[in-house]
Image (tube, rainbow, N blue to C red):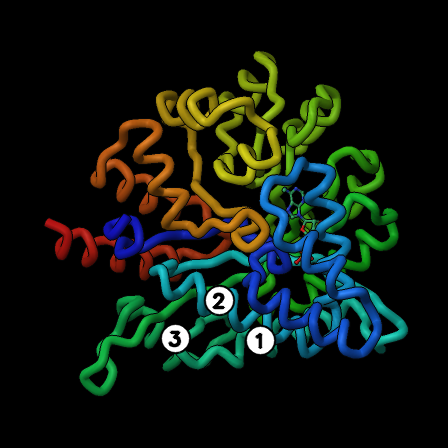
Amino acid sequence: MEWCVSMPKIELHAHLNGSIRDSTLLDLARALGDKGLIDFSQVEHVILKNDRSLSEVFKLFDLIHIVTTDHSSITRITKEVVEDFASENVVYLELRTTPKKNDSLGMSKRSYVEAVLEGLRAVSSVDVAFIPNSEEPVNLSSTLLSDASDKCNGNTRKKIFVRLLLSIDRRETTEAAMETVMLALEMRRFGVAGIDLSGNPAVGEWITYLPALMFARQQGLYVTLHCGEVSNSKEIHNMLDFLPQRIGHACFFEEEHWRKLKSSNIPVEICLTSNIRTLSVPTIDAHHFVDLYNAKHPLVLCTDDSGVFSTSLSNEYKIAASTFGLGQKEMFELSKNSIEFIFADDVVKEVLRKTFDSAAKSLT
Ligand code: 6MZ
């Protein structure tokens, strides 16, 4: 496990509220219980349940959202999630979250995202670079060109790049999806790089989100889609025809979907523990990671919901290494290759390549 933790890693598929610490979730739930707003004993039982089907996971998310969706909680969770990823040597993190509107709390989608940004600014244990280079004053941008782990006053201080993806929930209408895309465009200068389509895959129709996704792409936002989390051949075809920059999961693909995916070379975000826990793949040995890896198809290991599934990115690397018989060198290469699929500019990619190169020297 040690080298899985110490090597630099890139996380491209992490849902903010799914990455919440258990301790924080219980803490926030207890506080609502004390105010008489929820029955804590009921909620505690649901939070601590370990094995959940895909539909139970979405019920849990509804509960998590009741507990977490106020500005200060969102700020706290963001700060903690970034700190947690940085502590296991994630050097680049794309964090995705669904902007939420809650009139009773005075929350708009914009104020939700502002609370997330506040969380990024609140991180103190590690340097967080989330403003894109094009928005940085020249001297700051040159600082970013240094290695992602700098010597500062004799101490090594970690750096993490963070980019945000705004998620469209499959329960949303076309108008709501468009509102999220407009917000992402407005928030680009604060590190919002793209759009994700997620939420319960048993809900909603592709055609509902298509106008907003097309507009996002026209405006130069990156797009990643949860694709094939359930069996839905027509939707999988439609999604692949859209040519998103990445897709997540790809569990219920049939031969013709694999053919289309491979010929279009769309990178796949692979979430091993999540897929096993939600029974989206029958066994870990049968996971499509093997076929994609052997075919040299672009892929990246990710956590999905590290809190909900009690995992970490280091753990995902460890599982892949031990299950598929891959060594430290192969896992390092897999991690380094992920740089090519990030939703950030060439300057960031170059910094990350240097970070991996200097880590490679210390490994040999
Ligand atoms: C699809 C998922 C997901 O946005 O509130 N989400 N969507 N499949 C998954 N696989 C298990 N895991 C998480 O984070 C939680 C939200 O992310 C999406 C769901 O919409 C969930 O409500 P945010 O930060």
**Residue 198: which quarter of the image?**
top right
Residue 67 in picture, x, y percent from top left: 73, 66
**Residue 326: which quarter of the image?**
top left
Crowding at dot 1, Cα within 10 Å, few <14 / some 14-19 / many 20+, comes out as many
Residue 21 in picture, x, y percent from top left: 55, 63
Residue 335 in picture, x, y percent from top left: 34, 45
* Mark 1 vs mark 2, CA separation in Å: 9 Å
Question: Disc 3 vs disc 2: Cβ atoms closer than 8 Å?
Answer: yes
* Mark 1 vs mark 3, CA separation in Å: 13 Å
Relative height, residue 117 to residue 327 (above, below): below
Which disc is residue 119 wearing?
A: 1
Outermost residue on the bottom side: it is: 153
Give amino acid for label 1: Gly
Give the SS element for disc 2: helix
Give amino acid for label 2: Val
Asked whether 130 or 105 is in front, the reply is 105
Which disc is residue 135 wearing?
A: none
| Residue at 83% from the left image edge and 66% from the top image edge | 101
Residue carrying label 3: 126
Crowding at dot 2, Cα within 10 Å, few <14 / some 14-19 / many 20+, comes out as many
Asked whether 167 or 327 is in front, the reply is 327
Earlier-in-chain disc, 3 versus 2: 2
* Mark 3 vs mark 2, CA separation in Å: 9 Å
**Residue 245 visible within the image:** yes
